[in-house]
Image (cartoon, rainbow, N blue to C red):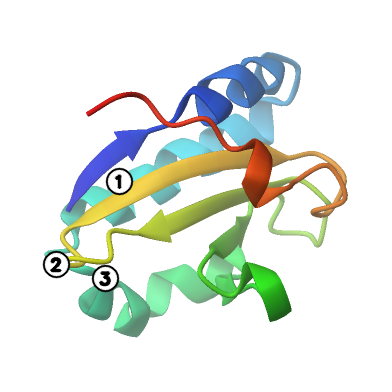
Amino acid sequence: MNLLYTKSFDNTSKKLRSHAKEKTNLNNIKSILESSTDFNELKTNPLIKFYGFEQLRYQLNEFYSFNLDKGGGVIRLIIKPDELNYKNIYLIFISYKHYDDFSKERVIYYDE
């Protein structure tokens, strides 16, 4: 799959410099994403369970998240599959407060 970055992700990922373990886990997750052919294959990959992969609920159900601290921390990577062909994944945001600092209305995409 292709990884598509958002401005929101780029801005929030800068804080990861002070979180070495979470940054390593982010790189591992990105490798898993890139090695998958599409989103349906990703959902069946057993490795994603190590990172607490889950679909968000209610008004955020178009987004999915990974826990960047495998020990149950609050830092999450939020992604969104491309709706057309599921061959692209948007890296949307890194939440440092268990989604409390995330709002889909505030996500800034790069012009395509």
Q: Which residue is drawn at 18% across and 65% down?
A: 84
Q: In this view, does 61 lie to the left or right of 58?
A: left
The image quarter containing residue 93 is top right
- Going from N to C along the chain, the mark reached first, 2 or 3, is 3
| Residues at discs 2 and 3 in contact (Cβ within 8 Å) | no
Q: Which amino acid does label 2 sit on?
A: Asn
Residue 79 location in percent, x, y? Answer: 48, 53
Q: Quadrant of the C terminus?
A: top left
| Residue sitting farthest toward the bottom | 44
Query: Which of the two labelled residues, at mark 1 and mark 3, occupies the earlier sequence position?
Result: 1
- Marks 1/2: CA–CA distance: 20 Å
Residue at position x 43%, y 36% in the image: 27
In this rendering, position of residue 25 left or right of residue 97: left
Mark 1 crowd level (few <14, some 14–19, many ≥20, 10 Å Cα): few
Q: Residue 68: in sight, yes or no?
A: no
Label 3 Cα neighbours within 10 Å, binned few <14 / some 14-19 / many ≥20: some
**Residue placed at 17% from the left, 53% from the top?**
1
- The percent coordinates of residue 65 (x first, y second) are 58, 61
Q: Mark 2, mark 3: which one is toward the viewer? A: 2
Q: Distance between the residues labelled 2 and 3?
A: 9 Å
SS at badge 3: helix
Q: Mark 3 — residue?
A: 39
Q: What element carries label 1?
A: helix
Label 2: which residue? 85
The amino acid pointed to by label 1 is Ser
Q: Which amino acid does label 3 sit on?
A: Phe
Which numbered disc flags the more N-terminal residue, 1 or 2? Answer: 1
Instruction: Please tell me whether mark 2 sits on a helix, a strand or a loop.
Output: loop
Q: Please tell me the numbered disc located at residue 31.
A: 1
Of residue 21 and residue 108, the one placed in the foreground of this image is: 108
Please determine whether, in this image, residue 57 is positioned above or below residue 19.
below
